[in-house]
Amino acid sequence: MAKPKQFLPIFILFCLSLILTSMKCSDKDLIDAKKKAFCQKWVHSYEEDEDENLVFRNSDYDLPPSRGRVSFEFFEDGKMNFTGISPTDAHQATGGIWEKIGKNIIEVSIDDNKQVMKLEIISLENNKMVIKYVN
């Protein structure tokens, strides 16, 4: 029968490999790893914002009534739609493009006013995306 001390080095190696594997998985780019979840329509759920982190929910999510909400709709081919609030408080939809420019960072170019924004994807699930604006 094997002694417990003989299994200790194997157990330690096993634990280290689990830790290293989980670290490597968390280093994945969220956009690449979850492209299907990313490429959909996202509506700003400002009630859930925390500091500079902005929360967006997918368009199927039941949000409370609001006078207006900003939304992004991303497509796999790099195109996008942006819906903002116009000066007359109506929704204003505009096309644009998005491009991944770094790990979890996209650059969004909106057609109508040539506005360019850099967004960092903090977390991404099927029904919730948390972003923050990057300089």
Image: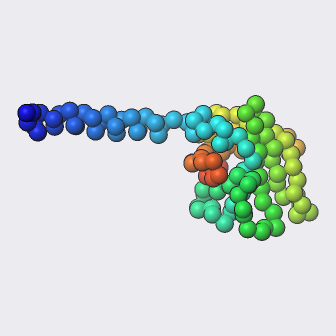
- Tell me what residue is drawn at x 16 percent, y 35 percent: 7
Whole-percent x, y for residue 83 in the image: 82, 51
Coordinates of residue 119 in the picture (x, y in percent): 65, 45
Q: Residue 127's spot in the image, x, y percent?
A: 65, 52
- Residue ID at (80%, 47%): 82
Left of 130 or right of it: where is 10?
left
**Figure quadrant of the N terminus:** top left
Which image quadrant for residue 104? top right
Seen from this angle, which residue lies furthest top?
Answer: 77
Residue 66 location (% of width, % of height)? 78, 67
> Is residue 33 among what the camera can see?
yes
> In the drawing, does residue 52 fall left or right of residue 46?
left
- Image side of residue 11 versus residue 6, left or right: right
- Image color mode: rainbow
Residue at x-position 84% and y-position 58%: 85
Q: Measured along the vertical axis of the image, is residue 122 above or below residue 7?
A: below
Could you tell me which quadrant the C terminus lies in? top right
Query: Residue at the location (67% across, 42% down)?
Result: 38
In the image, farthest residue toward the right:
88
Q: Is residue 131 visible?
A: no
Q: In the image, is 76 to the left or to the right of 114?
A: left
Quarter residue 60 falls in: bottom right
